Image: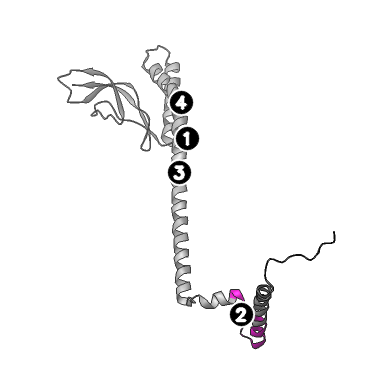
Amino acid sequence: MAKNKKKENPVPEDVQDQSEAVPQQEAQEAAEAVETGQAQEPQAQEAAEKPQKDQGQLLAEAADKYLRLAAEYDNYRKRTAKEKDSAWTEAKAQTVAAFLPVYDNLERALKQPTADEAYKKGVEMTMKGFQDALTNLGVEVIPALGETFDPNRHNAVMHVDDEEAGENTIVEVFQQGFLCGEKVIRFAMVKVAN
């Protein structure tokens, strides 16, 4: 039962000697290069191979980056200022729109005949205060009566044939319209002739 315990090696001995000799040869060449001072770090070798940029080119690139960054910041500043302004105008317009029914009621109260002069004076003062507040906010009444109909500012709810009025002329205003800057808060409700 005693078998030969020696492992069989599928690779011939002369090939094994050559494969062991290759790493030894590379290590010996590297050691000789270090001794003679010819060895270089891999990073240093890569840096030596890359073409060096001169200082003028580096300065031009830095200046270009700076100018681009400054332009981007300027655009950002302008865009945020515009957004802030439009947000303020939108908030103001929504707030004023919520109070316009009060304006309409005061306007109706002023048109009603009354014998009480103190009451009438009080309603007039309230309306004047309301109009002053709107003016201070930059809100304007859209001109309508006698004006040419403009669909961007007026809402025509009635049409009438009138020989005395011109073409597309507003002859009656049912409800005042309001502007905040260029933004229409509420269209004027009008009657248009011809």
Q: In terms of image quadrants, where is residue 120?
A: top left
Distance between mark 2 and mark 1 Cα atoms: 69 Å
Distance between mark 2 and mark 4 Cα atoms: 82 Å
Q: Position of residue 23 (x, y in %)?
A: 66, 75
On whether residue 86 falls in the magenta region, the answer is no
Nearer-N-terminus badge (4/3): 3
At a point 47% along the width and 39% down the height, the residue shown is: 88
Position of residue 45 relative to residue 152, above or below, is below
Judging by the rendered image, the residue that carries numbered circle 4 is 99
**Label 3 environment density (alpha carbons within 10 Å; few <14, some 14–19, many ≥20):** few
Distance between mark 2 and mark 3 Cα atoms: 58 Å
Q: Give the foreground label among 4 and 3.
A: 3
Q: Give the residues in magenta.
A: 30-43
Distance between mark 3 and mark 1 Cα atoms: 12 Å
Judging by the rendered image, the residue that carries numbered circle 2 is 40
Q: Position of residue 144 (x, y in %)?
A: 28, 27
